[in-house]
Image (tube, rainbow, N blue to C red):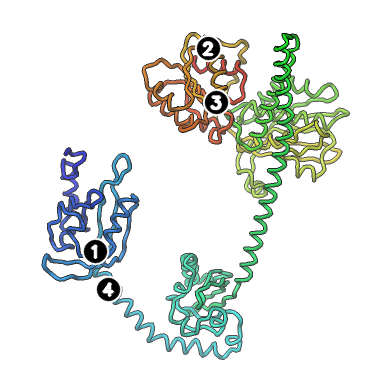
Amino acid sequence: MDHASDPAGGEEFTRLRAMFAQSPSFSALLQGPEHRFVLTNPAYQQLIGHRDVIGLTVREAVPEVENQGFFELLDEVFTSGKAFIGRDVEIVLRRAPQGGKETRYLDFVYQPIKDEQGTVVSIFVEGTDATERHLTEEAHKASEARLRELNATLERRVVGRAQARSLTWQLSPDLLGALNSNGYFETSNPAWQTILGWSEADVASMSIFELLHPDDVEHTRAGFELTLVGQPAIRFANRYRCKDGSYRWISWVGIQEDGFVYCTGRDITAERAAEIELATAQESLRQSQKMEAIGQLTGGIAHDFNNLLTGIIGALDLTRNRMAKGQSEDIPRFMDAASACAQRAAALTHRLLAFARRQPLNTKPNDINHIVANMEELLHRTLGEQIELQTALAGDLWTAFTDANQLENAVLNLAINARDAMPSGGRLTVETENTQLDSAYTSLHNDVEPGEYVVVSVSDTGTGMHPDVVAKALDPFFTTKPMGEGTGLGLSTIYGFIKQSRGHLRIYSELGFGTTVKLYLPRAVQTAVSPHAPTLATPRGQGETILIVEDDTTVRLIMSDALKDLGYEVLEASDARPAIPLLQSERRIDLMVSDVVLPHIDGKKLAEIARAARPDLRILFVTGYAQNAAFRGDFLDPGMDMLTKPFALDALAARVRMLIEE
């Protein structure tokens, strides 16, 4: 047996033995599930009567502790891997080989020791013989009890004489009493027996902590200590045990004076029950509202997707019929219609993910003025000649964290809404500014943190909105447009994008005077990233090898054929299990394209395994939805990128080439 598996071998054990010998606490090392003694120190030997126990199991070495629970504790610690801490634990030991038994009290710890795989292999025992302390404390308690009994009669007479003179004391429906500093009621009025069933003698014989519900002991102890130092207890609620075993809620007022806390307690059990009933009703209402919202969301999705699927299926059926008849002239038109419906379905999916704040975002430090300025030509074309476009861009604007493409989409959607609100023409203003939201503002809007923000405001001079419409404007599928002219997802998806970006959105509107929507984006202290120039031609491969890991057969086939057509060599895997041997082989792999959501092992974990074997491997994630991939910066390491499904094959080709050439 080598030193790695034998705890009694090597320099490490010698050092451990020396540490044991010097420890003032008793210590022992028990190996394996049978708890065999490997090492003990002099203090431990003294505790068990100087027996020779090395090599013996605990059951063999100290059989007298059978049925005292120690063997079972050791088994539990070894099985669960959780330490056990005991204080003032009573144990009966034979202190000499042939001697009689005696009772000792121990403070000790059973600490599991685990190997590199996390398996418990040994238990370290350490503690102190607390017998002398225990006996001293017991004697002290007995002395205190005798002293308390001697003082009780006199104190009860003094306090009781003053209280008995008051009819209020006898007739009050509330609990009354004088509580001493040790937590005992020296006197109690008849309401204790009426409400809780305890006589005055019963109350005086138990501390308040014996009468409390176990869950209320700690916070009551803390409140009692504050009352003793002069801080009154006002409406302090806890649960007291009745003589029949039930509990009632009592609300206390307590004031300290002359060493006593004078208390009055009101039974609020009925009020508490009413509060619980109200909370249950409110929760049921919230659940009902949630289900109503889900029904509305589901209905809207079903309506839009059924229309889109009808267009796709119909176009494909017509294409198949024309091909069967050898009539090819209309096929491009049908294919364009199917593609257009598919693109609209993809856009709807992205809007839903934005509404749910689950779309993958490419959040980076961005120059917001640059983004808005580059949109001016697009906004002019969108608004038409009847609407004047103005921009007011702050000269000292901070950099902000955002996804540039999603911000462009948000501003464009707001401009389209504004255009529709100005059918006779008007003015649209896009403005940027720096601002700081303080705690006074954020306390009124609990969906935003205090801090510095860059604000993009889109204002129109249109018809404006009624306050009832503003209140619903962010709800999914809520729209004021005629049937078929709007999905009602516009503002709700913008709100989802802004919240996912850790920002804030506010709407200001007045009927007849127009609307302003403000987008608050968190300030970034980093320098803004440089915009990438668009790729004009589909880049081709140069014989590089790409591993595709995708569990959807159709998607994997399409990506594989597209990349092969571009000059790449392609390896395919349906999930991580066949991919891992390829990644750990000597096979050339220049890039891995992996879905994020995979069976057995997800794409993120697969990437970690791949990087362990190939530290410089470039990785492109493709995802339709992945909750933990919502923030790319939190998900991607250097040499990685992400492409959101569905995507055009040209976009796949461009992203693959960009990663390979980095």
Q: How far, Cα to Cα, is label 3 from label 1?
A: 61 Å
Q: Is residue 262 left or right of residue 318?
A: left
The tag earlier along the polypeptide, 4 or 2, is: 4
Tell me the number on the disc at residue 66. 1
The amino acid type of the residue labelled 3 equals Asp
Observer-nearest of 640 and 263: 640
The tag earlier along the polypeptide, 4 or 3, is: 4
Say which of marks 1 and 4 sits in front.
1
The residue singled out by tag 4 in the image is: 136
Tell me the number on the disc at residue 552. 3
The residue singled out by tag 2 in the image is: 564
Neighbour class for label 1 at 10 Å: few (<14), some, many (≥20)? few
In terms of secondary structure, where does tag 2 sit? helix
In terms of secondary structure, where does tag 4 sit? helix
Q: Residue at x 66, y 31 (%)?
A: 349
Q: How far, Cα to Cα, is label 4 from label 3?
A: 74 Å
**Quarter of the rendering containing residue 513:** top right
